[in-house]
Image: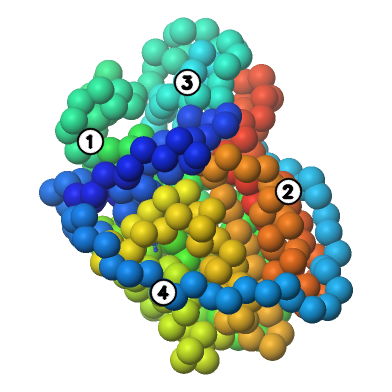
């Protein structure tokens, strides 16, 4: 996503232990917002705004929530999106009308489909130039525009060729979206959702369509612009979504002070990122505070808090322990594991992220 004027310092401790895709996702985020190049909008230069004061955390009283792990949430090939094949360090995916080839560090196995299937790709991420956005892609058939129409479960939005090999959506997140939409529908009452690190807004659109009132926060002005475009594209302009450019931690702290409360909180933080005023986000340093804040901005009858993590040298056991401790005394269950995408050609699982969620 982001590429603001600042470049992430080398942080070997944040290097992925198994997944280049995670690394790339972290890298983009490290640069502070969605797809904004040095010439782009969004997080500004090298300025570093002081972060919010660290919270004084102490162990929460009360029984730990029940636990369910490992839980592997899988996205299977579907009409909107499919992981067609993978291998030899690459993946071949179908995004709506286009076949796309991108690097995939985890695909250390061999491709299952013959070369003729890979040769039918419409777009290949090369990443071999310093150019921004679409300049880093090669189109073997005909040149393509920067965006194209996509759908998720009947919601129209735009796919997008971006500088950091991403395409404006993380399809593996659909497992969380479906779960959240189910909770909203089953609640049969007004539900407020907070989507922190919301990027192009798919989760926000799914929540709004399911009937929730949504607050979407991202550090990148550009990502918020794309999310708004997606809202229009989806025909959901009348739905209540607040689009906010802000630092996630600062925003959550302000909500706590103002007494704003939410029934569902989603947070999908990068390993390293920047707020719009240069606030530094470091997952290992800041996640405990943000998780605690997420708990304290819940309504009296909350439904869920969903954390996803990637590009980090950690296991889901780590975020599981953090979530379980933080939600002590709340009842419910903490479920943790991995988000995976099931490959169409040979049925292999591609792991994309770790997650941990508290469900009432
Ligand atoms: C991986 S994306 C989240 C993807 C999203 N959950 C989805 O499924 O589409 C991470 C987002 O975090 C944003 N970000 C990075 N640092 C941030 C910060 N300090 N505060 C708020 N957003 C930040 C980036 O701009 C990026 O859009």
Q: Secondary structure at mark 4?
A: loop
Q: Are marks 2 and 4 in contact (CB under 8 Å)?
A: no
Q: Secondary structure at mark 3?
A: strand
- First in sequence: mark 2 or mark 3? 3
- First in sequence: mark 2 or mark 4? 4
- First in sequence: mark 3 or mark 4? 4
Residue at point 43%, 83% (across, down):
254
In the rendered image, the vertical position of residue 87 relative to residue 95, given as above or below: above
Q: CA distance from mark 1 to mark 2?
A: 38 Å
Whether residue 26 is visible, yes or no, is yes
In the picture, measured across the screen, residue 302 lies left or right of residue 12, that is: right
The residue that disc 4 covers is 52
Q: Nearer the viewer, mark 2 or mark 4?
A: 4
Which residue is nearer to you in this view: 54 or 260? 54
Residue at point 34%, 24% (across, down):
124
Q: CA distance from mark 1 to mark 3?
A: 19 Å
Q: CA distance from mark 1 to mark 4?
A: 36 Å
- First in sequence: mark 1 or mark 3? 3
The residue that disc 2 covers is 317
Percent position of residue 112, x then y: 59, 12
> Any atom of ligand 1 within 8 Å of the CB at mark 3?
no
Residue at point 67%, 43% (across, down):
315
Residue at point 58%, 76% (across, down):
56
> Any atom of ligand 1 within 8 Å of the CB at mark 1?
no
The residue that disc 3 covers is 90
Q: Quadrant of residue 164?
A: top left
The residue that disc 1 covers is 134
Q: Furthest-bottom residue in view? A: 259
């Amino acid at each position: 996503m982001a590429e603001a004027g600042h470049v992430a310092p080398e942080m070997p401790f944040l290097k992925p232990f198994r997944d280049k895709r995670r690394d790339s996702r972290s890298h983009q985020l490290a640069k502070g917002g969605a797809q904004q190049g040095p010439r782009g909008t969004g997080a500004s230069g090298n300025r570093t705004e002081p972060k919010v004061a660290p919270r004084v955390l102490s162990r929460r009283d009360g029984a730990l929530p029940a636990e369910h792990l490992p839980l592997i949430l899988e996205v299977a090939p579907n009409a909107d999106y499919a992981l067609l094949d993978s291998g030899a360090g690459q993946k071949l995916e179908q995004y709506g009308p286009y076949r796309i080839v991108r690097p995939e560090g985890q695909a250390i196995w061999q491709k299952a489909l013959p070369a003729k299937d890979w040769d039918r790709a419409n777009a290949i991420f090369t990443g071999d130039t310093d150019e921004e956005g679409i300049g880093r892609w090669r189109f073997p058939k005909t040149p393509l525009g920067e965006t194209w129409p996509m759908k998720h479960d009947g919601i129209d939005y735009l796919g997008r060729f971006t500088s950091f090999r991403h395409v404006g959506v993380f399809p593996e997140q659909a497992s969380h979206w479906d779960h959240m939409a189910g909770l909203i529908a089953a609640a049969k009452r007004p539900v407020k959702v907070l989507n922190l690190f919301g990027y192009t807004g798919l989760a926000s659109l799914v929540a709004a369509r399911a009937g929730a009132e949504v607050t979407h926060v991202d550090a990148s002005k550009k990502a918020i612009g794309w999310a708004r475009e997606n809202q229009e594209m989806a025909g959901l302009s009348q739905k209540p979504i607040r689009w906010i450019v802000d630092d996630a931690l600062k925003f959550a702290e302000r909500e706590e002070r103002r007494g704003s409360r939410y029934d569902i909180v989603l947070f999908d933080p990068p390993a390293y990122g920047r707020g719009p005023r240069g606030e530094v986000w470091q997952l290992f340093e800041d996640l405990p505070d943000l998780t605690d804040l997420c708990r304290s901005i819940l309504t009296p009858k909350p439904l869920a808090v969903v954390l996803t993590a990637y590009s980090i040298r950690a296991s889901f056991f780590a975020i599981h322990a953090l979530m379980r401790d933080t939600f002590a005394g709340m009842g419910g269950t903490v479920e943790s594991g991995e988000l995976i995408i099931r490959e169409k050609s040979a049925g292999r699982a591609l792991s994309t992220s770790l997650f941990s969620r508290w469900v009432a």
